[in-house]
Amino acid sequence: MSTTAGVPSLPEVVARVLAREPRAVGRALRLVDDGGPASHALLKALWPHTGKAWVLGVTGNPGAGKSTLCDRLIAAYRARGVRVGVVAVDPSSPYTGGAILGDRIRMSRHATDDGVFIRSLATRGHLGGLTRSARDVVRVLDACGYEVVIVETVGVGQDELEITHTAHSTLVVMAPGMGDEVQAIKAGILECADVFAVNKADREGADTTVRDLELMISLGNESIRALSKARGHATHGMADGFVQPPTPASPDTLPERWTPPITRCVASRGDGVDDVVAALDRHRAWIDGTEAGRARRRARLGEQVRESLREALIEAAVGDLGQQLDEAVRAVDERAVDPYTAIERLVAAFRAR
Amino acid sequence: MSTTAGVPSLPEVVARVLAREPRAVGRALRLVDDGGPASHALLKALWPHTGKAWVLGVTGNPGAGKSTLCDRLIAAYRARGVRVGVVAVDPSSPYTGGAILGDRIRMSRHATDDGVFIRSLATRGHLGGLTRSARDVVRVLDACGYEVVIVETVGVGQDELEITHTAHSTLVVMAPGMGDEVQAIKAGILECADVFAVNKADREGADTTVRDLELMISLGNESIRALSKARGHATHGMADGFVQPPTPASPDTLPERWTPPITRCVASRGDGVDDVVAALDRHRAWIDGTEAGRARRRARLGEQVRESLREALIEAAVGDLGQQLDEAVRAVDERAVDPYTAIERLVAAFRAR
């Protein structure tokens, strides 16, 4: 993307991105990160070249050892000759950028391997920007021919849950004795976990963590539904055929229903990583090779589309309403109007334009 | 709300809620929790009676001792004869409902005090439902005459940040040696913290936690801005006049700019709780008594209005588009259309209706 040659045309940019020219890829990712019309034009042009990557979400609490395990996974996939893209979603403040956490540094042994591309994203303020950004970056890396794209997120909050809708398979990493047993039961973890890895499995408390997970999984969908119904809670987003009491399955046949396997590893030494990789391979095969797996993928896509729609709507509304929005805030602040009426008027004004 | 008398009229419901009739309040909260037109009608009718409560957000990581400290705060405000409402936002799965965490149980000594009302909310799926629910429940409790409403959230994720926009003052609770030093630097904590409480201050590592916080605060707004700009990140939502290097302020005069004070306490024994309460009182006086404080409150209200607008838009769109949305998901899944074009069409269809 030479500056002397002027602004390259969209087809030129696309060609260079598909050829994985580092500067073109970097520029495309910055463009996509910023969002807006130019980003959309590029993403539309890249779209026909996407859909080949397998997207692996890796989530878990800080300190569980996600980055160390990701490092091992990258090495495992590279050993198969597969190109790996990594999107590290780090919701830390601008301070850190990985410098304090140090996570990114641990991955740096892949820095000189041009079959590995690592992109860090920071939190982008409000209104779902992070999820959109992560999803679009995944699509660029997919178009570039990274056959595995790992999306690593910190924690298991709502944002992270949304980001897992981008993934075909989600690995939840836990460590013993970190309060993970309780954290694990946080919202949606059963909905998003396809494989559990209990890392630092040589530490005291690993058995407890595994048992807690087994209990949680064995209670299964029906119990969750019954409980939810009793409490009047929505079970929105909980796909059918996901959680059930574990049943021993033949390793050769794909199960009709997927039960998240619990693997153990010590990522720092590389122990047990093969088991994690095997469990992920099996989930990938299930997603691709069974009706229930395909239905699950479609359900996640549905969530993605709804999230994109929400973002597109608020973006368009904030852009269109402009001053009217500020005036509404002032009116509510001065108690001249209640917020419910104010919002109804804003929605109507947006639709009438 | 007698069943023999038929369905009570809206003015009747409002009168009973304002009179704090327990059954009417409970019914109003369930209605508000469910959302929808009936909820909006009630909230509009209650709106003229709101705006009197001081809303205190309490957030921090699991294990920091938020609930124990909240328990102490409730007791302190009750000792002043003030009615206290509590909205406990617990993003744990339907399993827990506080039973595993046990947090709610600790507050139960206030269960027989009719000057205290505690309402738990669980995560409500996607699309910002939790934030909306928390905000509306706060408004009902405000209308009911609870003069202090405490909103307790677990963790410091995006959802929790949004919920703090509901609060006039936000207390961030930390504990030494829990990886909090790193967690503290997570997205937005500087934006939302008005007062820090380092709980379990008798434990090893408390000094380190305090020092880390001091450093973070002293780096201040300008450094964050500079860093953010250098990295091309938005600093959206970072109100002016918020963070600056701590300057010793006379305890009698309100500072022009607010620097989050760092208090220490051992909530389990009640030590230092007075200092936390005093710091919160001072922040409340600043919010009400200075131009910068009022500007800060308006900025948070602006965030609230934008969030409400986002929720109202997606709710209206999902309702209106119905089948068209499902068809779009199928088309993207079958790769008949790229998701960007599909979303553009959905937005246009929504606006054209």
Image: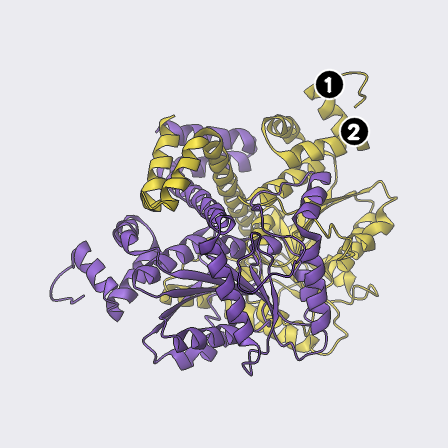
Chain colours: A yellow, B purple
The residue under label 1 is which amino acid type? Val
- Pick the residue in front: B315 or B84: B84
At mark 1, the secondary structure is loop
* Chain that bears disc 2: A
Closer to viewer: mark 1 or mark 2: 1
At mark 2, the secondary structure is loop
- Pick the residue in front: A26 or B333: A26
Tell me the quarter of the image containing the N terminus of chain A.
Answer: top right
Q: Which mark is residue A197?
A: none
Q: Which mark is residue A19?
A: 2
Residue that lies at the very extreme toward the top in this rendered image: A5
The residue under label 2 is which amino acid type? Ala
Q: Which tag, 1 or 2, sits closer to the chain's start?
A: 1
- Pick the residue in front: A181 or B90: B90
Q: Position of residue B66 (x, y in %)?
A: 54, 71
* Chain that bears disc 1: A
For the question of whether residue B336 can be seen, the reply is: no
